[in-house]
Image: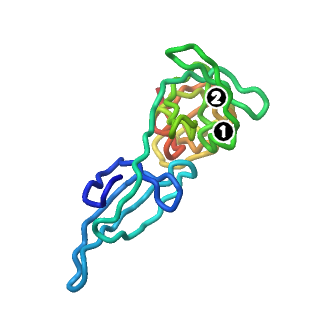
Amino acid sequence: MISTSDFKNGLNILVDGDPYQIAWFQNHKPGKGGAVMRVKLKHLKKGGTIERTFKSGEKFEALSVARQKKQFLYKEGANFNFMDMNTYEQISVYSELLGDKSNYLKENLEVEAIYLENELIGIELPIIIEMTIAEAEPGIKGDSVSNLTKMAKIETGADIRVPLFIKEGDKIKVDTRTGEYVERV
């Protein structure tokens, strides 16, 4: 069991039967009454963030979260197939578990699978990945200086906003956290 005095960023705990990771915490001592701990918690399965306040000394169950390197192989219907980089065992993951992250999965991309108590709860993509532009409207000459953007389709089929000078076939870097264009390669 973990007490509020043991809190640190990144700690995984069970709160009201749900798995959370501590994103931020602050010890707060009001003018009267006992000290409390203000905490921002990120839900490990759903991904949402909540803010809670706990009394000093409250106890929580610690959770063990493991990470394993996986390689994305291919998509089959609504399932995505990954291979374990150590055992070469293949697993199939349904698209609902991946959410928007499926927009950035291309063959042979290495990801980290996140396991909570031996149950796969999600994957973590590299922060920056390289993608090829599959479809883009042609830019107008002289538009390379402005900060205007247009919609383009990357090789996985996802739509992304890119500068006007980007054309079909260009390789770009994409931030997987926000889905935004970073730079041309």
Q: Residues within 10 Å of mark 1 (few under 14, many from 20)?
A: some
- Residue, x 49% and y 44% (percent of image)? 177
User: Which residue is disc 1 drawn over?
Assistant: 158
Foreground of the two, 21 or 171 = 21
Number of marks present in the image shown: 2
Find out whether the residues at labels 2 and 1 contact each other: C-beta distance under 8 Å.
no
Residue reaching furthest right? 77
Mark 2 Cα within 10 Å, few/some/many (few <14, many 20+)? Answer: some
Mark 2: which secondary structure?
loop
Q: Which mark is residue 90?
A: none
Which mark's residue is nearer the viewer, 2 or 1? 1
Residue 126 in percent (x, y) is at: 47, 32
- Residue type at mark 1 is Ala
Q: Earlier in the sequence, mark 2 or mark 1?
A: 1
Q: Vertical placement of 10 versus 3: above or below?
A: above
Q: Residue at x 51, y 62 (%)?
A: 16
- Residue placed farthest to the front in the image? 1
At horizontal 43% and vertical 66% (from top left) the residue drawn is: 51
Image location of residue 53, percent across then percent down: 37, 70
Apparent side of residue 55 relative to residue 156 in the rendered image (left or right) = left
Q: Residue 168's mark?
A: 2
**Color style of the picture:** rainbow
Amino acid carrying label 2: it is Glu
Q: Judging from the image, what secondary structure is the residue with disc 1 in?
A: loop
Cα distance between the residues tagged 2 and 1: 14 Å
Residue at (55% x, 20% y) in the render = 84
Q: Quadrant of residue 26?
A: bottom left
Q: Position of residue 12 (x, y in %)?
A: 41, 48
Identify whether 52 is placed above or below 61: below
Who is closer to the viewer here, 46 or 101?
46
Name the foreground residue: 140 vs 101: 101
Q: Position of residue 140 (x, y in %)?
A: 60, 39
